[in-house]
Amino acid sequence: MGNILTKKKRLNMAFQLMPKDLYCYFDLFCDHGLLGLHMRENSLAQVFFNDKRGALLREINEKYGIGEEHLLDCPAENISFPSSSGLFLLGVGGILMAEVLKSWHERSQLHPDQYFVLGPNYYEFHLRQTLKELNFQLIKRSFVWEKGQGYELFLVRWQEDCDQELWQNFDHEFWRGCLGEDPHAETYLRQKYKSWLKKRQISEVERAYKEEMGTFLDQLVKKAPAT
Ligand SMILES: C[S@@+](CC[C@H](N)C(=O)[O-])C[C@H]1O[C@@H](n2cnc3c(N)ncnc32)[C@H](O)[C@@H]1O
């Protein structure tokens, strides 16, 4: 097994979430390309690298000999991919990710045997709304804390018909599990809650989510042993 992702908790967790028996994989918004390189080291089938900054891709190619045919030098919105693909969308905001998914949906790129690991840097609730609208099914999710920042990661796939309410609900059980594994989950949720409080315009759905999160955080305070 390669170790290029040593100390890269977020990328490692994303890699773990993805099924390993697919026909090809895409490291989108790849920048340094570490995840794609890790996939190659771990002998996953074909790996494609995408970034809208072509110079980055050429640099990776010169250094690691990826092969021109595996470089996708264009906005992620424009790529095409076959069935049985695994796509990683990590390290950009949820608004851009939502736009990219919408564009693929409009271009009929989405099929139920493709898997997507999504790890937005921020605006994850906006992304969740789009996932609900476009009929994405949540398969697995995870939380990771790296360098003072928390990230939610989602393994999803598109379904013809899949209206999952969970995209707009606060998932008490999931977060209780996360807190048991990593106390930073509470810091993350408190930061999120604070940012919700600052929001001037808030929809009904967002309000309900925020209130659920508030209730969850209040319960944590009540349960904490007195010092
Ligand atoms: C912060 S890096 C993320 C690197 C890596 N995915 C990670 O999570 O560590 C973001 C990259 O997204 C690229 N990018 C931004 N918008 C893009 C788009 N619409 N299509 C493709 N790449 C894009 C930028 O050029 C940049 O290299």
Image (cartoon, rainbow, N blue to C red):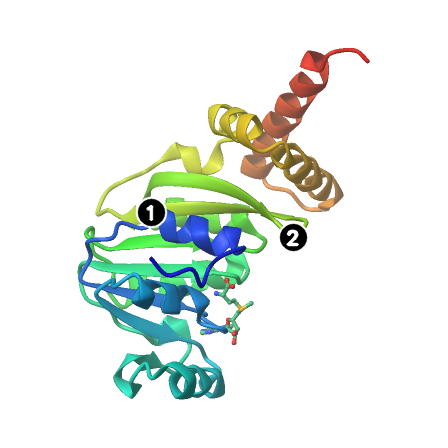
Rendering coords of residue 28 (x, y %): 40, 68
How crowded pointer 1 is (Cα within 10 Å; few <14, some 14-19, many 20+) is rated as many
- Assign a secondary structure to mark 2: loop
Compute the Cα span from label 2 to label 1: 25 Å
- Per the rendering, the mark at residue 17 is none
Q: Are marks 2 and 1 in contact (CB under 8 Å)?
A: no
Q: Residue at x 42, y 51 (%)?
A: 14
Tag 2 residue = 147
Within 8 Å of ligand 1, the CB of disc 1?
Answer: no
Q: Relative to residue 36, is residue 9 depicted above or below?
A: above
In the displayed structure, 45 sits above or below 201; it is below
At horizontal 35% and vertical 36% (from top left) the residue drawn is 164
Question: Which quadrant of the structure image shows residue 137?
Answer: top left
Q: Residue 76: where, in percent of width, then height?
A: 39, 72
For marks 2 and 1, the one nearer the N-term is 2
Residue holding disc 1: 156
**Residue 127 location, x and y as percent?**
48, 51
Residue under the point 46% across and 56% down: 11
Q: What amino acid is found at the position of numbered circle 1 in the picture?
A: Val
Which residue occupies 69% across, 35% down? 190
Element type where label 1 sits in the image = strand
Q: Quadrant of the C terminus?
A: top right
Q: Is residue 66 among the parts visible in the rendering?
A: yes
Which of 97 and 148 lies nearest the eye of the viewer? 148
Residue 200 appears left or right of 137: right
Mark 2 crowd level (few <14, some 14–19, many ≥20, 10 Å Cα): few
Whether residue 148 sits left or right of residue 30 in the image: it is right
Q: Residue furthest right?
A: 227
Q: Amino acid at mark 2?
A: Lys
